[in-house]
Amino acid sequence: MRRHIAFFNFPAVGHVNPTVGMIEELAKRGHRVTCTVTEHFAPIMKAAGAEPVRYESVFGDFYRVPLTPEETAGEGLRSLNEAISLVAQVAPFYEENRPDVIVHDFMAWGARFFAAKNGIPLVRTYPVFGANEHFSIREKFPVAGPNDPQIVEAVRKLAGVLPQFGLPADPMGFLTHIEKLAVIFLPREFQYAGETFDERFVFTGPCIAERPYQGTWQPASPDRPVLLISLGTSARGWPEFFQMAIKAFGDSEWDVLITVGEHTDPADLGPLPANVDVRRYAPQLDVLRHARLFINHGGMNSTMESLNNGVPMVLVPQTNEQRANALRVEELGLGRLLAKEDVTVESLREVAARVTGDAPVAERVRAMRERMRSVDGPAVAADAVETYLAGLD
């Protein structure tokens, strides 16, 4: 039966990209799929077979200007303002085009507001570690204390907003609520406390979709190992890191590709050694098919894409969430964490050599790659949504 499945997402690359494979699969199965998106992501959703429902985000161009660690402390208040604004903008469309189910990012509170007011069932998605009664990333790796003024203000405002949408004035109940179905875009083996997640949670592994709009990439030489270095295409600040990386790996055995994103000008990094290529962006999936090592910031997208291609990592996290990812990679023996304050030309060389020369790391990464590729993530995610809808009939 053809259904109308609405996706309410969060306007950041790390939240949108993991859903694209799932959206493509549902559209291929004949469902009507609509997606609330900012203008930047609208062409991607359209290419995936979905109908974009555009809105203006409180976060602005968050896809290329993410929060700094200092700004992240106010994330809750911004997320609440985003939710209120989102509902106001898209409610007219969805009241005329009522969905059978809303699939929403765990940070897209607007979906929960609209669904509660209109009696629409929900499915939650996690492009990061999932949360249940036993594990929460916010509790294990808090970005701010409970008495932080911005946290207090967000909780106070949330208590006043919830009744407007027919929800109890219970902020903590709202924040800890677990849906009847959640889709987590990770393998269970990677999830902290993965064994505690019951049948309400479906682990799909990464639902990676091809990105033809990014172009293609081929290594300069088939005989030299490829080293990919990135702090995320939205990285803010720290051009010194890239300068250290160039010194560490220039004129070495590596063919090095460095992507610096929006906020560092490649021209500012000076003359480059012949084996180093610096760009703002590159088609990461293409590069990882050839890479032997990936030095990155520990974003979950990059982590999953690296493991899906069997590439070990050196992780230099910038935020608490990235640190959680990096610690899990190190805990599972899939790479090494290098703290930001410990980054030097020498430490980059040393840890890269240590990871690439570690046979047990290579074997564990290979095993994780095989495990991830043994699961058709988009199909598993689509099956879960269809089964859930069938149970509502």
Image (cartoon, rainbow, N blue to C red):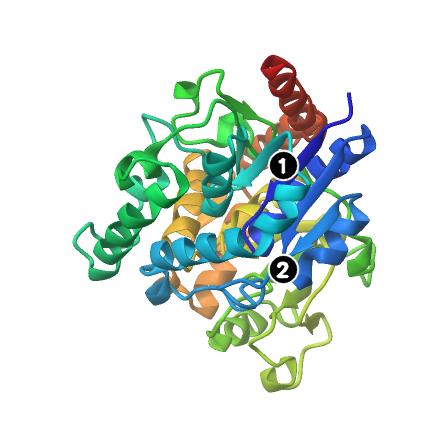
Label 2, secondary structure: give it: loop
Q: Closest to the observer: 145 or 299? A: 145
Answer with left or right where residue 9 lies relative to residue 140.
right
Q: Quadrant of the C terminus?
A: top right
Q: Is residue 3 above or below residue 94?
A: above
Q: Which mark is residue 38?
A: 2
Nearer the observer: mark 1 or 2; the answer is: 2
The residue depicted at 52 percent of the width and 55 percent of the height is: 88
- Residue 391 falls in which quadrant of the image? top right
The residue depicted at 21 percent of the width and 52 percent of the height is: 145
Q: Closest to the observer: 229 or 283? A: 283
Q: Is residue 158 above or below residue 133?
A: below
Within 10 Å of disc 1 (Cα), the crowding (few <14, some 14-19, many 20+) is many
Residue 350 screen position, x and y as percent:
48, 57
- Of the two numbered discs 1 and 2 on the same chain, state the one appearing first in sequence: 2
Q: Is residue 86 above or below residue 31?
A: below
The residue depicted at 46 percent of the width and 52 percent of the height is: 83
Distance, label 1 to label 2, CA atoms, is 23 Å
Residue 218 screen position, x and y as percent:
83, 58
The residue depicted at 67 percent of the width and 80 percent of the height is: 272
Q: Which residue is mark 1?
A: 206
Q: What amino acid is labelled 1 in the image?
A: Pro
Q: What amino acid is labelled 2 in the image?
A: Thr
Residue 36 screen position, x and y as percent:
63, 50
